[in-house]
Image (cartoon, helix red, strand yellow):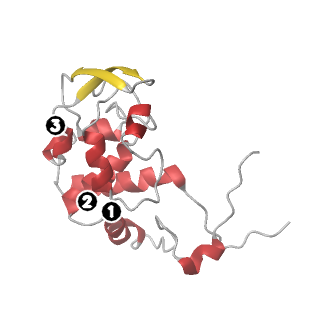
Amino acid sequence: GTPMPKDAIFRIASQTKAIVTVGLMMLYEKGYFLLDDPIDKYIPAFKNPEILLDYQQGDTTFSTRPAEKPITVQHLLTHTAGIPYGHPLYLQADVPMFNSLENETLADVITKVGDLPILHEPGEKFTYGINTDIIGYLIEVLSGDPLDVYLQREILKPLGMTDTHFYLPEQKQDRLVALYKKP
């Protein structure tokens, strides 16, 4: 029954993917990389990816084989890199499923991901996963700036998106709309 204030702040969750992708494509337009570049050119942890053949959740053993081709920037953009969300092997390696309040950087998490096997050959099929997180780290590597600083400077501030943050400042928290879920 309470009217929605005009300055209410909503969580945008996966809509950050569009903002991060625009940030990367701005670097593409400036010639920082090519879409077919292997990501190990910028993030060495992804050199020589391995394909997961089987995973035994009971004892956490698994087997792999070498991938036939590298993961490219385009594979990340199209979610065809074979990198999942929430796979038990990734969770075992302490890769956050969606978000984390742990004191770790994108570099910390993405380096762990680079050392893990992927689920299929790059480009073979769609696997929704943490590809955009990797793109965020790629932006950091290419731009030399933390992702939040880069996005604020290049996208959010020029567009007047003054209430868009990864972590909402305390002085704006009273404007955050409650998030409800089904019981």
| Front-most of residues 101 and 11 | 101
Q: What's the distance in space between the residues labelled 1 and 2, CA to CA?
A: 6 Å
User: What residue appears at the point 44 percent right and 25 percent down from the top-left corner?
Assistant: 57
User: What residue appears at the point 42 percent right and 68 percent down from the top-left corner?
Assistant: 156
What's the amino acid at mark 2? Glu
- From this viewpoint, is residue 149 visible? yes
User: What residue appears at the point 18 percent right and 22 percent down from the top-left corner?
Assistant: 68
- Tell how many labels: 3
Mark 1 nearby-residue class (10 Å; few <14, some 14–19, many ≥20): many
Circles 3 and 1: CB distance less than 8 Å? no
Circles 3 and 2: CB distance less than 8 Å? no
| Front-most of residues 23 and 131 | 131
Mark 3 nearby-residue class (10 Å; few <14, some 14–19, many ≥20): some
Mark 3 vs mark 1: which is more N-terminal?
Answer: 3
User: What residue appears at the point 68 percent right and 73 percent down from the top-left corner?
Assistant: 6
Percent position (x, y) of residue 11? 58, 59
Eyeballing the image, is 88 above or below 42?
above
Which residue is denoted by mark 2 in the rendering? 140
Which residue is denoted by mark 3 in the rendering? 47
Eyeballing the image, is 127 above or below 133?
above
Circles 1 and 2: CB distance less than 8 Å? yes
Percent position (x, y) of residue 7? 64, 74
Mark 1 vs mark 2: which is more N-terminal?
Answer: 2
Percent position (x, y) of residue 114? 25, 40
Q: Which one is closest to the eye, mark 3 or mark 2?
A: 3
Which residue is denoted by mark 1 in the rendering? 147
Q: Which one is closest to the eye, mark 3 or mark 1?
A: 3
